[in-house]
Image (tube, helix red, strand yellow):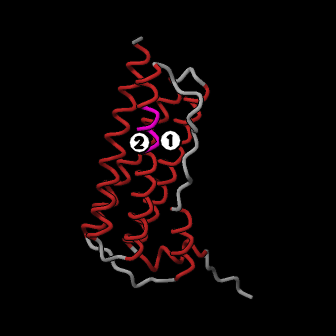
Amino acid sequence: MPAKTEERIQALEVALNNESRERDFYLKNKERTKNPHGQSMFASIASDEDEHYHRILELHKRLQKDGKWPETVPIQVKGTEVKAIIRKLIDSVDTSSKADMDDLEAVKMAIDFESKGEKYYGDLAQSAADPVEKSFYELLSSIEREHRLSLQDTFEYFQDPAGWHRIKEKHHIDGA
């Protein structure tokens, strides 16, 4: 098998390992947290990571079998629901939802995971010569970015729910 194909297979194996570890992390923290927003956020991202894992596994199998990036495997993955969760939180005006130190630490770790995933997939996209492969990795990188941004929002919310709502709702005194 050509060296480039071996590199692609190894890259997908790293991605499979990362997606699996992250999914398990999110599921564990969904069960651990008492915060409803944290439960929703962790569940949504766990579902996304699981879907990524299965799509990457399919690509991995085809690449091993055919020795080239598959042209017939759909590159689309389902969109993430994290923006909808943030929107629901803004609309709920729940400023009493408490997060504990474990929640804050879990979200900080998750932000780190997503930052690394965003960079990893972005680097793979940049090095891909095949346009379908490049598009696939760009899509995964953009989803990881969306996860990271939503988790940063979650971290801010966990630290100060009332302040977070004031900022997100953009209330102001207009003097009228």
Q: Is residue 117 left or right of residue 71?
A: left
Q: Main secondary structure of the magenta part?
A: helix
Identify the secondary structure beneath mark 2: helix
Q: What are the residue bounds of the magenta stretch?
A: 54-60
Queried whether the magenta region covers residue 57, the answer comes back as yes
Where is the N terminus found, in terms of image quarters?
Answer: top left
Residue at the spot 40% in from the left edge and 24% down from the top edge: 64
| Farthest-out residue, bottom | 176
Find residue 11 and report its horizontal and vertical position in percent.
38, 29
Residue at the spot 57% in from the left edge and 79% down from the top edge: 91
Q: Do the residues labelled 2 and 1 touch (CB within 8 Å)?
A: yes
Q: Which quarter of the picture shows residue 41? A: bottom left
Identify the residue under disc 1.
141
Find residue 98 and report its horizontal and vertical position in percent.
34, 79
Find residue 78 and report its horizontal and vertical position in percent.
55, 52
Where is the C terminus found, in terms of image quarters?
Answer: bottom right
Identify the residue under disc 2.
117
Q: What residue type is labelled 1?
A: Ser
Q: Which amino acid does label 2 sit on?
A: Gly
At label 2, counting other C-alpha atoms closer than 10 Å, the crowd grade (few under 14, some 14-19, many 20 or more) is many
Task: Say which of 30 and 111 sits in front.
Answer: 30
Queried whether the magenta region covers residue 64, the answer comes back as no
Find residue 92 and report its horizontal and vertical position in percent.
53, 82
Identify the secondary structure beneath mark 1: helix
Q: In this view, does 128 lie to the left or right of 42?
A: right
Task: Say which of 120 and 55 sits in front.
Answer: 55
